Image: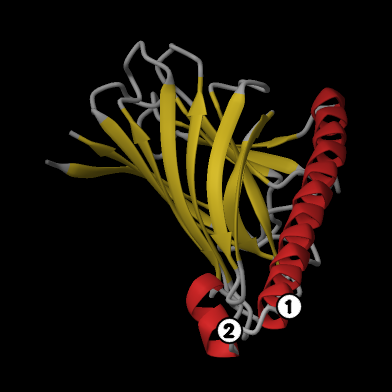
Amino acid sequence: MSDTPVKIVVDLSKPKGQRESIIELTSAELTEREEMRIESEATQAAEDKAQKETAKKKLSGRNKLLDLGLTEAEVTALIG
Amino acid sequence: MTMTLVETITVGSGGASSIEFTGIPQDGKDLVVTFSSRTARVNSVGFVETQINALTSGYSYLYFYGDGSSVTSSSGGGNSWRWIYTNGDDSTSNTFGSAQLYFSNYSSSNAKSVSVDSVGENNATAARAILSANSHTTTAAITSIKFFETSYNLLEHTTASLYTIS
């Protein structure tokens, strides 16, 4: 059996029992898949960075409120 | 309101790079897809991407996300909608991410909108949940919906069920 990835396509315009096709990816589809992988990983890295920045700012803000004299309970009530 | 199961796709033992419904009947008002997935990616919880009508650009999103300790909100765009959480191959055995997608007025000549709620289910302390609002400017009726992971296979027992709402 080939190691080429396959896709499953179900054509709903056909009668039940004749709808499903399992098709090997073409070279163009494999290239497109690789391009999407690169873009997806870049997007994921940007999202991870944004989430870390948000967490960092939240911690910084919490510490500044504590420095101002608020209690932990008060800070938690304000910002969770 | 009537919710009618049109078809279910279940990935077999060899896995698949994508699963796709084509020739979607235009006799409903809205579409619902229920989705359960696990992928070959070693990344406890990852994403499965969605495209409609084989369009590879013009997707927009707004989401908020929680992981048990923080919540994040963001918006943007790209060549697919990517806000379905899936379990990766290193997550707890026999666990799957799940999602429900709601496509409003899918056969209309208006821009298309989809809401998605999804979770990764890893039987671990940290889990992820996401709620997103997604849109595409296409005014064509939705005739196909494709689900895929960008570079790893969807594993056996991944399923997608398509329903029409009328």
Asked whether residue B11 appears in the rendered view, the answer is: no
Q: State the residue at coordinates (35%, 11%).
A: B109
Q: Say which residue appears at 57% left-offset and 52% top-offset.
A: B84
Tell me, for residue A63, which label it has, or none: 1
Q: Which label number is shown at residue B8?
A: none
Q: Quadrant of the N terminus of chain B?
A: top left
Element type at mark 2: loop
Label 1 chain ID: A
Q: Amino acid at mark 1?
A: Asn
Q: Is B134 displayed left or right of A46 in the figure?
A: left
The answer to whether any part of residue B121 appears in the image is yes
Give the position of the C terminus of chain B as an image quadrant.
Answer: top left
Q: Nearer the viewer, residue B111 or A10?
A: B111
- Where's residue B101, x and y in %? 42, 45
Within 10 Å of disc 1 (Cα), the crowding (few <14, some 14-19, many 20+) is some
Classify mark 2: residues with Cα within 10 Å, few (<14), some (14-19) or many (20+). Answer: few
Q: What percent of the width, then of the height, locates residue A53? A: 78, 59
Mark 2: amino acid: Asn
Q: Quadrant of residue B86?
A: bottom right
Looking at the picture, tell me which residue is in the foreground, B13 or B116.
B116
- Residue matched to label 2: B123
**Considering only vertical position in the picture, is A61 above or below B106?**
below
- Residue A58 against residue B107 in the figure, above or below: below
Residue A69, quarter of the rendered image: bottom right
Residue A23 percent across, percent down from the top left: 68, 35
Residue B7 falls in which quadrant of the image? top left
